[in-house]
Amino acid sequence: MAGLPRALFEGRIVVVLTEAEAERAVDFLLNQPILGFDTETRPTFRPGPMNDVALLQVATDDAAFLFRLNRIGVCDPVVRLLSDTTVTKVALSWTDDTHQLMRRRRFKMGNIVDLQDYVKKFGIEDASLQKLYANVFGQRISKTQQLSNWEADALTTAQQRYAATDAWACIRLYEELRELQRTGKWELKRHEETVSE
């Protein structure tokens, strides 16, 4: 994947720092046709309990909202967004994210399409975001910011782009896979891992 061109979200990014900003963001997001979701957590580098989710990122085709949960918590507007059942929501490995979010606050999760389940109908076994995106679009998603400090006072531009890209990529994958399924113009190619002796 290293030689593939890099995929990067180039749209508008809004960092949400207060409950009032969250309310406005959620009003906007719940009027969109499709949303991509992801979360980030400050990594721990030693045994012990995990940190709480620090960031919830929600993307449209051209905008991404980064909810700083380490500042605002899973406040009422965030719960309204997560509980909604009217807008198509897409994520990857969302069960794990839901469990982590519920450590902050209990809520009823609305409908969400989990790409790890969705790709099974195509016979795809390795459903990591990087590999899915590379196989479907021939582009790579960089993971260099994954282990950065998501509880920092201010997120760097690189962190913001990384977080937005992961949520936005879920939308792109879902829409492309739906189109491939509709047209039947796809072929599963299996690549055997080469093992050196």
Image: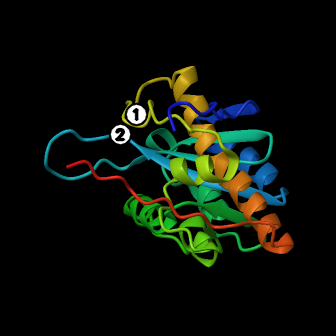
* Image depth: mark 1 or mark 2 in front: 2
Q: Which mark is residue 42?
A: 2
Percent from the top left, x then y, of residue 102? 43, 65
Give the residue displayed 73% in from the left and 64% down from the top: 177
SS class, disc 2 = loop
Q: Is 154 displayed left or right of 168 in the figure? A: left
Question: Which one is nearer the viewer's eye here, 63 or 27?
Answer: 63
Give the residue displayed 44% in from the left and 41% down from the top: 70
Percent from the top left, x then y, of residue 77? 65, 55
SS class, disc 1 = loop
Spot the residue most to the left: 47
Give the residue displayed 73% in from the left and 52% down from the top: 172
The residue type indicated by label 2 comes to Arg
Q: Which residue is mark 1?
A: 151
Q: Gap in Å between the C-alphas at discs 1 and 2?
A: 6 Å
Percent from the top left, x then y, of residue 83? 63, 69
Question: Which one is nearer the viewer's eye here, 21 or 124?
Answer: 124
